[in-house]
């Protein structure tokens, strides 16, 4: 029997729809509202509504809980040279204890253990490999070192050099905890005015932390999705977030994830809570690494609705969204977004999925 394959999540995207720069205002993006209960279709009854981010407050109710990722993007790209003069490009994947870190490293010739790389902040020493990553020793703790000497690591599909605007706009207004190498992009649409409007309406919010790694941009390397190994990301769902989520559930209100990173953190925490021998069904505080891979057929525990940007073809994030709303519904929504010239990916527009399929 044929299983779910990467090609099941492919779609045609004109390159000109890939947003290369943010709009002048955060809340100026378009919003495609998707109702999975209606399912795919054309015209009225399609379950699709064209709106704007400023309209988002019309699609949520008092007591609904918005969950944001408060990770802060650090300037995680760094350029250096071998003593021989060869260029080396480095991208922080994950800080480790002390002055160690895991990096993506690219050079014209293979890098060997013991190899020094010269940078403006001192020598980076290659200590070894861990799969596709290099374990290195830095002159200072990773976050401190890259904040002092790195540059903003825009996604690979943004084909330009980062500029001063990216320092602010590739960062959520709620960003607080340094450690991400890529932004939780759904939250980029919210400015202080929109957050104030939502708060005035009685919509609540809380935060968790998931440090987005560069692995989020890695394509699937096999057609069979069960052969894919997810990258690890560090996350924390704190006590305050758990209390807010459990209170919303008790009141019969929705828990709305602002972005797929929030989904990954919440569902990881929910799995850990559910596996506890003392579990009473409530979400408990959790922190650690997650490699959760959410595909169609996933058993949802924590998330009731989802705001998310438009994702790459054949990507794990598109699979996650399809698991939430149904593959046909999602691909129909993507076809509509292409036809209506929505802007795609990190600096692009958003879609709001009002509830889970079958919920």
Image: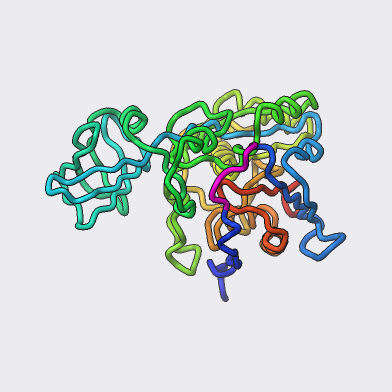
Reply yes or no: does residue 157 show up in magenta. Answer: no
When the figure is inspected, residue 232 is found, relative to residue 331, above or below; the finding is above
Q: Residue at x 17, y 46 (%)?
A: 82
Q: Residue at x 59, y 64 (%)?
A: 14
Is 14 in front, or is 209? 14
Residue 28 position, x and y percent, is: 69, 40
Residue 337 position, x and y percent, is: 69, 58
Q: Say left or right for 117 vs 54.
A: left
Q: Say left or right for 308 vs 146.
A: right
When the figure is inspected, residue 128 is found, relative to residue 315, above or below; the finding is above
- In the picture, the quarter occupied by the N terminus is bottom right
Its colouring scheme is rainbow
Q: Which residues are magenta?
A: 19-25
Q: Say left or right for 107 vs 352.
A: left
Is 91 in front, or is 230? 91
**Mostly what secondary structure, the magenta segment?**
loop
When the figure is inspected, residue 241 is found, relative to residue 93, above or below; the finding is above
Residue 58 position, x and y percent, is: 81, 38
């Amino acid at each position: 029997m044929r299983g779910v394959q990467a090609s099941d999540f492919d779609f045609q995207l004109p390159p000109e729809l890939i947003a290369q720069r943010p709009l002048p205002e955060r809340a100026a993006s378009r919003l495609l509202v998707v109702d999975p209960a209606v399912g795919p279709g054309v015209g009225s009854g399609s379950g699709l509504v064209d709106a704007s981010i400023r309209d988002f407050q019309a699609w949520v109710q008092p007591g609904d809980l918005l969950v944001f990722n408060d990770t802060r993007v650090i300037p995680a790209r760094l350029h250096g040279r071998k003593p021989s003069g060869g260029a080396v490009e480095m991208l922080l994947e994950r800080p480790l204890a002390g002055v160690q870190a895991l990096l993506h490293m690219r050079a014209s010739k293979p890098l060997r253990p013991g190899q020094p790389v010269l940078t403006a902040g001192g020598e980076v020493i290659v200590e070894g490999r861990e799969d596709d990553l290099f374990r290195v020793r830095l002159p200072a703790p990773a976050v401190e070192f890259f904040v002092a000497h790195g540059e903003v690591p825009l996604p690979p599909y943004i084909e330009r050099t980062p500029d001063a605007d990216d320092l602010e706009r590739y960062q959520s207004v709620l960003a607080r905890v340094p450690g991400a190498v890529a932004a939780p992009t759904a939250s980029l649409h919210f400015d202080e005015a929109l957050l104030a409007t939502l708060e005035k309406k009685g919509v609540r919010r809380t935060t968790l932390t998931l440090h987005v790694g560069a692995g989020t941009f890695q394509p699937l390397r096999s057609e069979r999705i069960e052969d894919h190994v997810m990258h690890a990301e560090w996350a924390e769902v704190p006590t305050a977030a758990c209390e807010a989520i459990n209170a919303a559930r008790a009141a019969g209100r929705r828990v709305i994830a602002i972005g797929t990173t929030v989904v990954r953190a919440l569902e990881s925490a929910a799995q850990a809570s559910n596996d506890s021998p003392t579990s009473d069904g409530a979400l408990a505080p959790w922190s650690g690494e997650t490699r959760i891979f959410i595909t169609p057929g996933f058993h949802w525990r924590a998330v009731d609705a989802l705001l998310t940007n438009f994702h790459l073809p054949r990507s794990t994030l598109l699979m996650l969204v399809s698991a939430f709303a149904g593959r046909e519904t999602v691909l129909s929504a993507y076809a509509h977004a292409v036809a209506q010239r929505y802007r795609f990916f990190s600096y692009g527009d958003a879609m709001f999925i009002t509830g889970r399929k079958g919920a």
